[in-house]
Structures are given as structure tokens and as C-alpha cells.
Amino acid sequence: SSTNELTAKNAASSNNLKDVNHCFFSRLGGNSINIYNSLNCGSGSKDKKKDIKINRLIVSNYFSLKSNQLCTLHQTHSNRVTILDKYNLNKTYIYDGIVTKQKNIILGILTADCAPVLFYDSKKRIAGACHAGWKGAFTGIISNTIDAMVSIGSSKKDISCSIGPCIGSNSYEVMNDFYNNIIAANTHDRIYFNRIKSDRYLFDLKSFIVDRLKSKGIVDISSINLDTYSNDMLFYSYRRSVHKKEDDYGRMISTIVIKD
């Protein structure tokens, strides 16, 4: 859809990377109905499998590739990263980060408030992607994804990064236990919180992620400043679905592929 194409353009890194394509897809332009309307790519949802299959085909077609060239992960909010040498469609990849040198394989990250983070090294032609909610970002998914890229030849100075739509700081209300858990590891991290009540804070996930990228030596960082929670028309949101007492939610897909 035109909205998805607009989103992709907004996500473009400051470098003109002609040998890689990436897109942060919205929820628009798919086949699913009701609460999943319409480009739900989350196989872990209760949506009809045939509709998810069609939606994944739509995503693959966007890159002029086949659905068996789209690689997504079974995400568990971990800090685990895999290096993809050859994609096995029948294998379940239980990771939250993935890196590859393989061409024409679409790396896909599924989100509904968490941040999709895409990486590319244009010199060595290495791509990466990770699913960064607070837990993954806190336990090292970003660092581990970068380290995996370096392990197969990247230099940190050559890695560009783009962060997709995620829950905004004005929508991400957390309690004392969340705040205490984060700052117990590093008191400096209180800068990502804005206290709104004695026991409640607003948490800035995107800034939390950006600073972790910077701490790993990543300089070229871009992001889409859209809040998944408040943009019901464009995005799925786990938190919004809970507040609306819906029994499930869809997932957007964020993608990157090295062109042949």
C-alpha cells in the first residue's frame, strides 16, 4: 500500500544503500479481518493461518521474492541471536536477533509495541535484525546482534541502523517494580523515566535503545517517530489490545534483505 511505501521511505538510513532493501510495514494492505485487520504476519496469533500465509506472501512480493525466502523468528524476548548461513523453511528459529550474508533472504522481525531494529554493513554486505522490547534491550539483544555481525566480518563503524515504530514514551506507563528493576542494574538509566505518580512512570524505550546502540559504537542511527499504541489505524499494539480487553492482537513485520 502507499502507506507502507511511505513508511519505508521514512525509515531510510542517512546513507543511500543501493544494495539493500528494507521496510517497516504497517498493519495496512493485508488479507486479515476483524481485530487482525489487515496485514497481520504473526504466526503466533490466533488469526486464520491462510490469511497469515497470504499476508507473508504480500510482504515477499513487495521485494519481488517468494514466501519461502521470508525468514521470521520465534521470538521470546530473549537476547539470543543466530547467524543464518542457509535458510531452512522447516526449522523453527527460536531467537530474537538474526544476522546474515545471504542474499535474497528477507529477515523479518514481528512487533506490536516492541521496537524492530534493522542493521546493515554496506562494505561487507552483512544484514541484521532484532526484536527489542524492554527485556531484550535490557539483557543485551542489541549488543549481541552487533557482536554477531562483527563475528562474521563487520566493523562497527560501518554498521548503519534504523529503528522502526514502537510504543512511545507518552504511552508506556510502568510501575515501581519495573523502574526499580532497570535502575538496580544502572542508576544512570533513571534518565529514561518520567515520574507521573508516586508509583508510576513513563518509560522511553526508543531512547533506551538508541543509547545502547551508541554505546556499542554505532553512529549512523535513524528512526521512525511513530507511536504504535496511539496510532490504531496504522499499527498493532499489544498494550492497546489489553486496555481494550481484546483476546488477541496482530503483529507488524519489519524487514531487510540484501539484494543479489
Image (cartoon, rainbow, N blue to C red):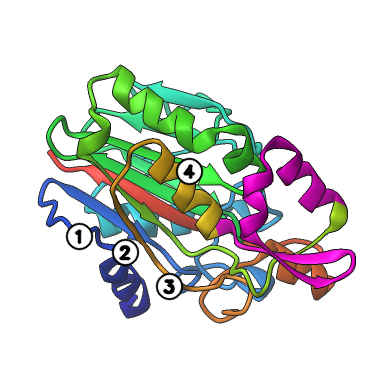
Image spot of residue 189 (x, y percent): 63, 49
Check disc 4 and give the amino acid type.
Answer: Arg
Question: Which mark's residue is nearer the viewer, 1 or 3?
Answer: 1
Image spot of residue 116 (x, y percent): 47, 52
**249 or 186, nearer to the observer:** 186
**62 or 122, nearer to the observer:** 122
First in sequence: mark 2 vs mark 3: 2
Residue positioned 43% across, 49% down in the render: 117
Q: Which image quarter holds the C terminus?
A: top left
- In the visual, does 96 lie left or right of 78? left
Magenta run includes residue 80: no
Verify CB contact (< 8 Å) between mark 2 and mark 1: no
- What residue is shown with label 2? 11
- In the visual, does 163 lie left or right of 208? left
- What residue is shown with label 3? 29
> Residue 214's mark?
none
- What residue is shown with label 1? 14
Please give the range of residues in magenta: 177-205
